[in-house]
Image (tube, grey):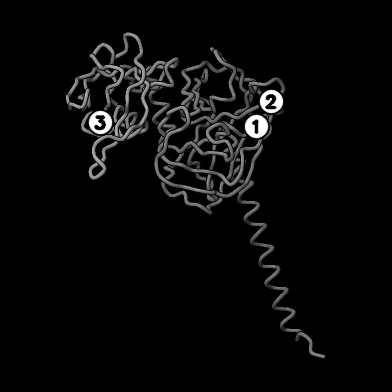
């Protein structure tokens, strides 16, 4: 009967000991990262009684959280800091389209994070979600990035600079908290509301843009024409072209005031093809208050129309 030599057994034991030490070092490094990040994480009461969510001190005196966890119309919020200390914060603004809300702290004593751009994040990378429990202690979840790709739009039309999807949902209490890589670098904020099946990380670039907009004016301005439309195909079978058939006009909206009619087909906006509603919203980005040229098909004839782009009102989310 053959058997292992003493040297082989010793080698196996050394390898096992080395693996255990490596796992222990990784475990300690993650716990240290949680402690460091949690110094900039607060807890807040959730929308339902008895629930909590997390908030991130994104900049000195500025807190970011997930919009969906808040009760509507809150002018202020009592946050829970380390050790259960209560901190009053005042509302700056909410952008439901990106699931972000911003609050201002009474002072800048608590440390802010130093987030990094999320461009380095790839599928398979480890993700560390950090929150704070109602009792004041830190909480955490550890998982894997399921998918990472380019810019996309949320179901409410918010432009998000990168699609970063977690391999599962966001555990209770962690929405609104920071998400970090294995090195402890924060690259976004966790949201449980932007996907039905996965947790989503709102990346640093989006958070920065929304925070800037809310601090400047209390809202994120989005281009609005005041139309409801559906995609159609025009032209011949040999040379088809996609456009948007106008099915409804908002009374006294920008498009109605400019002379757009129900039944018109919008082919282009500001020199960009209007192939679908996402393309139309992209073409209107950054155009609030500006005049743009529409390329139309009316009664089979091509024509142009100048429209002054308005700001998207919350009550008109189903229109563009």
Q: Residue at x 54, y 46 (%)?
A: 184
Tell me, yes or no, whether the two marked residues, 2 and 1, touch with CB atoms within 8 Å: yes
Q: Residue furthest top?
A: 252
The CA distance from mark 2 to mark 1 is: 7 Å
Which of disc 1 and disc 2 is earlier in sequence? 2
Residue 106 pos. (x, y %): 52, 17
- In this rendering, would 115 be left or right of 55? left
Disc 1 residue crowd, few under 14, some 14–19, many 20+, Cα 10 Å: many
Q: Residue at x 57, y 40 (%)?
A: 198
Which of disc 3 and disc 2 is earlier in sequence? 2
The CA distance from mark 1 to mark 3 is: 46 Å
- Mark 2, residue position: 51
Question: Quick one: 250 or 94, which is closer to the camera?
Answer: 250
Q: Which mark is residue 267?
A: 3
Quadrant position of residue 69: top right
- Mark 1, residue position: 173
Disc 2 residue crowd, few under 14, some 14–19, many 20+, Cα 10 Å: some
Q: Which mark is residue 40?
A: none
Q: Residue at x 66, y 23 (%)?
A: 85
């Amino acid at each position: 009967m053959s058997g292992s030599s003493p040297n082989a057994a010793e080698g196996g034991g050394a390898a096992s000991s080395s693996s255990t030490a490596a796992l222990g070092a990784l475990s300690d490094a993650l716990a240290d990262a949680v402690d460091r990040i949690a110094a900039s994480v607060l807890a807040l009461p959730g929308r339902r009684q008895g629930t909590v969510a997390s908030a991130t001190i994104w900049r000195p005196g500025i807190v970011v959280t997930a919009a969906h966890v808040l009760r509507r119309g809150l002018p202020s919020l009592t946050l829970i800091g380390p050790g259960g200390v209560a901190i009053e914060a005042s509302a700056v603004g909410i952008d439901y389209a990106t699931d972000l809300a911003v609050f201002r702290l009474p002072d800048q004593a608590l440390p802010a994070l130093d987030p990094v751009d999320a461009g380095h994040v790839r599928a398979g990378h480890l993700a560390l979600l950090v929150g704070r429990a109602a009792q004041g202690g830190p909480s955490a979840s550890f998982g894997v990035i399921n998918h990472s790709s380019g810019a996309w739009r949320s179901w409410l039309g918010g432009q998000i600079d990168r699609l970063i999807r977690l391999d599962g949902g966001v555990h209770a209490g962690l929405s609104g908290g920071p998400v970090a890589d294995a090195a402890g670098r924060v690259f976004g904020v966790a949201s449980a509301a932007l996907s039905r099946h996965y947790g989503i990380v709102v990346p640093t670039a989006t958070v920065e843009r929304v925070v800037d907009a809310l601090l400047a004016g209390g809202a994120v301005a989005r281009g609005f024409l005041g139309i409801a439309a559906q995609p159609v195909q025009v032209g011949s079978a040999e040379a088809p072209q996609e456009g948007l058939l106008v099915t409804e006009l908002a009374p006294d909206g920008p498009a109605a005031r400019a002379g757009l009619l129900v039944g018109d087909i919008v082919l282009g906006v500001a020199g960009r093809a209007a192939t679908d509603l996402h393309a139309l919203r992209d073409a209107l980005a950054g155009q609030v208050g500006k005049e743009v040229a529409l390329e139309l098909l009316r009664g089979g004839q091509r024509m142009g129309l100048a429209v002054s782009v308005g700001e998207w009102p919350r009550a008109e989310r189903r229109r563009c």
